[in-house]
Structures are given as structure tokens and as C-alpha cells.
Image: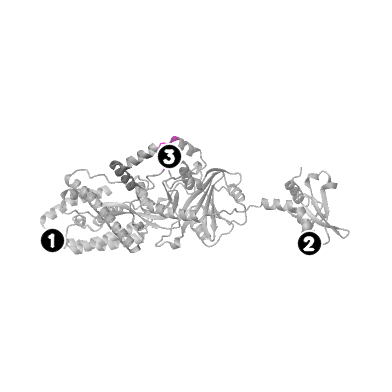
């Protein structure tokens, strides 16, 4: 049996007595080689189907290898005399090599060209258009996403699902932070903790106080946004700024408190105790 | 015969028979149609009249329906049932392979199929994208967008390699799927999805491709792993195709990215869309009826806020239609087909396979 692949492996990577390695490339000394170059496609030994043209005493012959006769090297190559006329010679070659060519062509993979009836194309396009309308794509996607949201597929912390709730939480954090800040203030300056209560009573008409409150809210918001690795300087700056703001707010409070009834004051003192307790809890 | 003939003649003279004959004549006579009139002016005039009449009838009908609903609400009765319009979807031809939600056979089949290792997250998908031999203009543009849509996808130039060789190569490099974009006349027209190593080969027709730059107000997707919406894949074949598509995407979407990729099947057309989304709360406007207490009460019950999802399309946008599903990897000669679309299958426009 002939195994072209095996023969080629041996020839190329092991030893071939016809091989001539010179600086310009690897060549072949086999007289049957068509190109004279040593490669897989022009190797007369490693190809079961092979044909070449050789000259013998001024006459050209077409040599064809018949692999079924490989066991008798004498009869391996079959030769056909080519006529002297070039055109006729080409015809003879074509006639004898037809089978080899056909095989080569049939081995090549090609795309198959199929018809595309215009009628069907049009029909499909029409139906597609209608199907798209029937699908109501955006709505159905939105619906599916909402179903997923209701099933709790989305992790709540990342998703913006409940923006209102998120805002509420932010506000809560702000408030508690404000309380803590206030507590610090008490320690440092022995100031009354009225401000906290004041914040909780939001229904004061004093616009100035409201503005201060808002600005402070923004400040603490910034703090929230800031990274967890809190730069001390920044924190100090913020604290200073807050101190200023709280002082301002206190002034405002005092003004408003003066105008306020006594009842409010009583309330404040009650809350004051509360605040102290809270402070203890914090401590 | 003669007697019979006589009889007939006798019968003809009878009055009753005559009337019956006249009736038959009126029956056989075609109903009046304006198209039978030869004078164009007259014809169009009568046609317009008929059309106007029809319109009036239709309006009267709908008015009557509305009045009935109103009356029912006033009386506190149940309003008459709304008629469901006949659509192609709800008059679909019965297909015995449509899967029920508790189809154990299907689940067992799913567990044993080629995609289960990916869908059970034992293996993460890795996709090779390539083209047909000749690729230009919109082909590369589509591929560059597909690369953004499908995470862990890699583009390889086709060169002159046989598809079987490419399948071999991809198997060696541990790819899980192979996607081939076919182009005809500088326009992508087919998509070949091959599951690897032994997965099925699906051949889709690709139409109506719109690239991102051609979509108005398009968004730019992030590199997060998208989540997947597969709608309406009902039959066995549909489930299989759906799972195949699912196996192209990672099974652990990053919800943080808020990206959604949709394959929506409608009447055997699979619509591909790619969106960014956001959930928002929206105030619902109270529908105030004209001084009717009942309805006011109803509208008060409805919560003022409602979450809605808003979408922004990122593109690309295209439609797929399954042409064939082949068992095993790509092999047009010796391959065994699970399903091939043939023209003789299109017996009815209400028959669907996915």
C-alpha cells in the first residue's frame, strides 16, 4: 500500500537521497520531478497520482504514474509519445490527464449557488414586517424586564430600581451624620444641641434657615460621595466648613427661637436629654 | 319520454312551479357589485356611497358597544366581555411539540444536550467569529458590533480555509461556538452558528440589518456582560434554538451594566435587539372622570408611582430566520439534519415551527 503522507514525512523529515539542500533552497534530483523543487505537491515519490513530461532523444513523452503498479517499479511509469505539434501535444495531455484534473476539481470545496425566488423573498419580507409590528418589541422587552425586577432578580444595591427609597436612605444617613457632627460640637464648644431639634421641626417658615439646612445637606452628600479612604485634610476642611455653617444656623435658630413660643423651648429641652442619651450610645 | 315531456309542459303551466323557478333564478343571479357597472363615473359614485355606508355602520356599532359598557358601569354590573381580536398568533395551527411548563421529557433532554455544560456554568463560553471568503463593507461593521455584544468573542480572518478546518482549529483552541457571517453583494445575509465540539449547526437567514450608527439616538454599550431575553421559543425546536443562542452568552450577567440582549421570536422570525435600560418611577396621572364617584374611588386605589423600564437601543438590529438545523458540526454532504425548512412546509401562514 502507498501512503503518501507517510512517504512525505520520511522524505522531508528523515532522509531522501534525491534531496539537494543548497543555500538558495531545497531541490530535488529525481528526474521525474516536474518543478525540480522539493515540496509536497511536486514530489514524485509522495504523490500517488503524478505525471510529468520528459525528453528522450529529441522526443517528448508524457509520463504518468499508476500507483497500482507500485510493486513493479519497471512498470510504474507509463509513457505516451507526444506529437511534435504543440497544439496536438496539448490535446493529448488533456486526454490523458482528464481523470487527475477532475479529481482535483471535485476535491476543492466550493460554495453552492442556489436560487432565491423573488416571490419568496418578497413574501418573507412582507411577513417579517408584519411580525415585527405584532411583536411590539420595546414593550415586550420592558415587560420582561419589569417581571424580572418584581421577581427580585436584580441586586438592590446596584440597581436604581427604587430611586425614591434610595433618596430616603441617603437623607436618613445625612441626618444621622448631622447628629453626630452636632455631638462633636457639643463636646468641643459646649454649645446647646438645639440645632438638631430645629432640623426635625421642618415646618419653620424662615427661608434663611432652610437654605442653610440645604447647603449643609449638600455638604454631607459630598462626604458620602467621597471615597471610603477618607483624606484627613479633606475631612478637616469639611468639618471647618460645617462648623461655620452650624454656627450660622445657630444664630438663625436663636433669632427664630426668640420669636418662638415657650412651648417649643420645652420641647427642645426634652429632646436635649434624648440627644445626650444618643451621644452616650454613640460613645 | 314523451310522457315525461308532456308532464313537464304541464308543470310549466302551473303557477306554483313558476314561482319556484323564479326563486332559483334569483339565487343563481350574482349579487350586485359596483364593479359590474361599466360606466366609470357611475361606478365610482356608487362605490363611494357603499363605502360611506359601511363606515357609518361600523361607527354605529362601536358607539353601541361603548354605550353598553357605560351603562354596565353605571348599573354596577360587569361590563360585557371585550372581544379578543383574531391574530395570527392566537389562531396558530396546533403543534404537538409545543412545550408545557412541566415537561419532564424536555428537561431531561435539556440536561443531556450539548449546551448543558455551558448553561450549568461548568464551562464559560468562548466564541470564534469569522466570515465567508469574500467579506466587505457591512460585513466587518457587523462583526465589530457583534464583538461588542457577545463577550469573550474573537474574530479570525477567514482566509481560504475550509470551514471544516476552522471547526477543527476551534476545537483545538477550546472554543465553544463558531459564528460565521455570510455576505452576499456586500450585505450580510446569513448567519451560521456552530456549537462545538459536537453541537448542532444552525443556519439562519439574516435580513434587515441596521448598524449602530444608523440608529437614531443610539447608546454606546459598556463592556459588562449583558443579560439575555429569549421570548416565545415554545416548541421543541424553538427550545433547542433558544438554548443554542443562550450558550453564546455568559450565564452570569452583570446587572450593574444594565445591558440587555433580546432574541424575540415572532412567527418564526427571530428579532435581535440590543438595549441599555433603566428603571424609573413614574407618576401616574389620575384619570378624572366627569363627576362620577365610583370611578374616582377606583383611580384613588391605583398607586401614584409606578416603576417603568426605559430603553435605549445600542444596535445592531437584525432579524434571523432559521433555515436548517444540523446534527453535529458543519457538514453539508454527510451531515444529518434535525430540521430543514422546505418550501412545501409552508402550507399555511399560521403554521410555525419555533
Instruction: Give me the chain letter of mark 2.
Output: A
Mark identifier at residue A258: 1
Q: Residues within 10 Å of mark 2 (few under 14, many from 20)?
A: few
**In this picture, residue B76 sits left or right of residue B121:** left
Instruction: Give me the chain letter of mark 1.
Output: A
- In the image, residue B137 above or below residue A72: below
Q: CA distance from mark 1 to mark 2?
A: 123 Å
Sequence order check, earlier mark of 1 and 2:
2
| Quarter of the picture holding the C terminus of chain B | top left
> Same chain, marks 1 and 2?
yes
Look at the image and name its color scheme.
Answer: one colour
Q: CA distance from mark 1 to mark 3?
A: 77 Å
Whole-percent x, y for residue A160 in the image: 34, 53
Direction top: furthest residue = B104
1 or 3: mark nearer the eye: 3
Taking the magenta stretch, the answer to whether it contains residue B94 is yes
- Under circle 2, the secondary element is helix
> Same chain, marks 2 and 3?
no
- In the image, residue B167 above or below residue B104: below
> Same chain, marks 1 and 3?
no
Residue identified by numbered label 2:
A87
Amino acid at each position: 500500500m502507498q501512503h503518501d503522507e507517510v512517504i512525505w514525512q520520511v522524505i522531508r523529515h528523515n532522509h531522501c537521497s534525491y534531496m539537494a539542500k543548497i543555500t538558495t533552497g531545497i531541490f530535488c534530483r529525481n528526474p521525474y520531478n516536474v518543478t525540480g523543487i522539493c515540496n509536497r505537491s511536486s514530489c514524485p515519490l509522495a504523490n500517488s497520482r503524478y505525471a510529468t513530461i520528459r525528453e528522450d532523444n529529441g522526443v517528448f513523452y508524457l509520463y504518468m504514474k499508476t500507483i497500482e503498479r507500485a510493486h513493479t517499479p519497471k512498470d510504474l511509469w507509463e509513457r505516451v509519445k507526444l506529437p511534435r505539434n504543440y497544439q496536438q501535444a496539448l490535446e493529448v495531455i488533456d486526454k490523458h490527464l482528464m481523470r487527475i484534473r477532475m479529481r482535483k476539481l471535485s476535491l476543492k470545496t466550493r460554495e453552492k449557488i442556489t436560487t432565491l425566488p423573488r416571490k419568496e423573498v418578497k413574501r418573507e419580507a412582507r411577513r417579517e414586517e408584519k411580525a415585527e409590528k405584532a411583536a411590539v418589541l420595546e414593550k415586550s422587552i420592558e415587560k420582561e424586564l419589569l417581571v424580572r425586577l418584581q421577581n427580585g432578580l436584580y441586586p438592590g444595591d446596584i440597581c436604581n430600581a427604587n430611586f425614591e427609597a434610595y433618596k430616603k436612605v441617603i437623607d436618613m444617613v445625612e441626618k444621622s451624620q448631622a447628629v453626630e457632627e452636632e455631638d462633636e460640637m457639643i463636646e468641643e464648644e459646649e454649645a446647646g444641641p438645639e440645632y438638631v431639634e430645629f432640623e426635625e421641626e421642618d415646618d419653620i417658615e424662615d427661608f434663611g434657615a432652610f437654605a442653610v439646612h440645604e447647603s449643609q445637606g449638600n455638604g454631607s452628600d459630598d462626604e458620602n460621595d467621597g471615597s471610603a479612604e477618607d483624606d484627613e485634610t479633606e475631612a478637616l476642611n469639611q468639618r471647618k466648613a460645617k462648623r461655620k455653617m452650624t454656627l450660622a444656623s445657630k444664630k438663625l435658630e436663636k433669632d427664630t427661637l426668640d420669636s418662638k413660643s415657650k412651648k417649643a423651648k420645652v420641647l427642645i429641652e426634652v429632646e436635649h436629654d434624648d440627644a445626650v442619651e444618643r451621644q452616650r450610645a454613640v460613645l | 319520454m314523451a310522457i315525461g315531456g308532456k308532464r313537464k309542459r304541464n308543470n310549466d303551466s302551473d303557477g306554483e312551479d313558476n314561482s319556484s323557478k323564479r326563486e332559483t333564478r334569483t339565487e343563481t343571479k350574482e349579487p350586485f357589485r359596483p364593479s359590474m357597472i361599466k360606466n366609470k363615473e357611475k361606478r365610482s359614485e356608487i362605490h363611494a356611497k357603499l363605502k360611506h355606508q359601511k363606515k357609518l355602520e361600523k361607527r354605529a356599532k362601536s358607539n353601541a358597544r361603548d354605550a353598553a359598557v357605560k351603562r354596565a358601569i353605571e348599573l354596577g354590573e360587569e361590563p360585557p366581555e371585550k372581544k379578543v381580536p383574531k391574530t395570527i398568533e392566537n389562531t396558530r395551527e396546533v403543534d404537538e411539540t409545543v412545550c408545557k411548563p412541566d415537561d419532564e421529557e424536555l428537561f431531561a433532554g435539556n440536561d443531556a444536550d450539548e449546551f448543558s455544560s455551558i448553561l450549568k456554568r461548568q464551562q464559560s463560553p468562548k466564541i470564534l467569529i469569522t466570515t465567508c471568503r469574500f467579506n466587505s463593507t457591512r460585513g466587518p461593521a457587523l462583526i465589530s458590533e457583534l464583538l461588542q455584544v457577545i463577550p469573550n468573542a474573537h474574530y479570525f480572518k477567514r482566509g481560504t480555509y475550509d470551514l471544516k478546518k476552522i471547526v477543527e482549529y476551534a476545537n483545538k483552541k477550546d472554543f465553544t461556538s463558531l459564528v460565521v457571517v455570510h455576505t452576499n453583494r456586500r450585505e450580510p445575509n446569513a448567519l451560521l452558528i456552530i456549537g462545538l465540539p459536537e453541537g448542532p449547526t444552525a443556519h439562519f437567514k439574516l435580513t434587515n440589518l441596521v448598524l449602530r450608527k444608523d440608529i437614531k439616538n443610539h447608546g454606546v454599550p459598556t463592556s459588562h456582560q449583558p443579560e439575555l431575553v429569549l421570548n416565545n421559543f415554545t416548541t421543541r425546536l424553538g427550545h433547542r434554538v433558544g438554548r443554542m443562542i443562550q450558550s453564546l452568552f455568559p450565564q452570569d450577567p452583570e446587572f450593574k451594566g444594565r445591558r440587555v440582549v433580546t432574541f424575540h421570536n415572532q412567527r418564526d422570525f427571530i428579532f435581535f435587539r440590543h438595549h441599555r435600560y433603566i428603571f424609573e418611577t413614574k407618576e401616574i396621572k389620575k384619570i378624572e372622570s366627569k363627576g362620577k364617584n365610583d370611578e374616582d374611588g377606583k383611580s384613588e386605589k391605583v398607586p401614584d408611582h409606578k416603576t417603568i423600564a426605559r430603553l435605549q437601543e445600542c444596535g445592531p438590529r437584525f432579524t434571523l430566520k432559521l433555515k436548517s438545523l444540523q446534527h453535529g458540526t458543519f457538514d453539508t454532504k454527510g451531515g444529518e439534519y434535525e430540521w430543514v425548512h422546505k418550501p412545501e412546509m409552508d402550507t399555511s401562514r399560521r403554521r410555525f415551527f419555533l
